[in-house]
Image: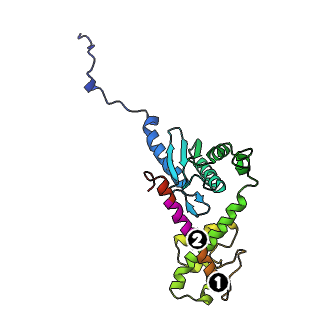
Amino acid sequence: MTAASTETPSAAALPPAEAPPAAADALPRAEALGDAVWRALGTVLDPELDEPITDLDFVESCTVSAEGVATVRVRLPTFFCAPNFSFLMVADAYDAVSAVQGVTRAEVTLADHHASAEINGGVAAQAGFVGSFEGSDQGEAVAELDDLRMQFFQKAALAGQDRVARPLVNAGAGPDELAATNLGDVPPSADLSRMRERRAALGLPHGDDAPLLIDADGNRITSAQVPLHLRRARLQRVGIETNGEYCKGLLAARYPAKAH
């Protein structure tokens, strides 16, 4: 009888070690979750500029750990950006990121701002705007920001009417035609979708049968009112866009090595 061999196989003969399935899947999952968090941040608007904070380059960093902890750092064009606007962006970013499936904890902070401590502490504690500034040496807040948000949605909805109507005007549409035009008559566009979203947030008509041109209460603009209404809408649009370009310039000057 031949004795059994006790020789140990060489390392080369051993099959390659396989990583545990959980470890092998962790990186792709974290990357996918990071993409989802970034998309969520893309829904957060600068209330005054009506643009996503991701497009404005206000997100300085965004990371997601293998454990699902999302860490976001927000920056703004100046040290003295209005605390109410700043709070809205940070609080909205926190809510958007926290709602992403797979995120176990959201840590959203505002950098380089005179009220960073109040805003960061208040958002983390879900204290609201008034609670965040209670007893602060920056001054105390007297009201929450829901009404302010609606005011900016109203401005954005008005500016959107100019964006959507302008191509029709350039194509020769007159007051009578514009007054009779409904949203369903307008070719689909990003500007149209954006205006519908702002109107929906305000509870204003935004379906296909809704008038293109409406007043602040949602009433159809008459043909006699069209010229003045469009002038007001254009002034609102130009004001928002001019302010946006100014803020982008300030951001680039403040963070020259980071802004892009």
Q: Is residue 109 above or below residue 52?
A: above
Q: Main secondary structure of the magenta part?
A: helix
Residue at image point 49% right, 53% down: 254
Q: Position of residue 179 (x, y in %)?
A: 64, 85
232 or 81, which lies in front? 81
**Residue under label 2:** 239
| Residue at image point 55% right, 75% down | 163
Q: Which part of the image, by quadrant, shows the N terminus?
A: top left
Q: Would residue 133 appear left or right of 164 to someone viewing this image? A: right
Of the residues tagged 2 and 1, which is closer to the observer? 2
In this view, 101 is above or below 205: above
Secondary structure beneath label 1: helix
Q: Is residue 83 visible?
A: yes
Question: Label 1 sits on what residue type?
Answer: Leu
236 sits left or right of 256 in the view: right
| Numbered label attached to residue 228 | 1
Q: Which mark is residue 67?
A: none
Highlighted magenta segment, given as a residue range:
237-249
Which kind of residue does numbered mark 2 sit on?
Gly
Q: Is residue 55 visible?
A: no
Going by the image, does 90 lie left or right of 248?
right
Residue at the outermost left position = 2
Q: CA distance from mark 2 to mark 1?
A: 17 Å
Q: How many marks?
A: 2
Q: Label 2: few (<14), some or many (≥20) within 10 Å?
A: some
Residue 103 picture location, percent across and down: 57, 44
For image coordinates 47% across by 56% down, the residue present is: 253
Q: Is residue 177 left or right of residue 25?
A: right
Label 2, secondary structure: give it. helix
- Graded by Cα atoms within 10 Å as few (under 14), some (14 to 19) or many (20 or more), the crowding at tag 1 reads few
How far from the left and from the top, in percent, is residue 164? 56, 76
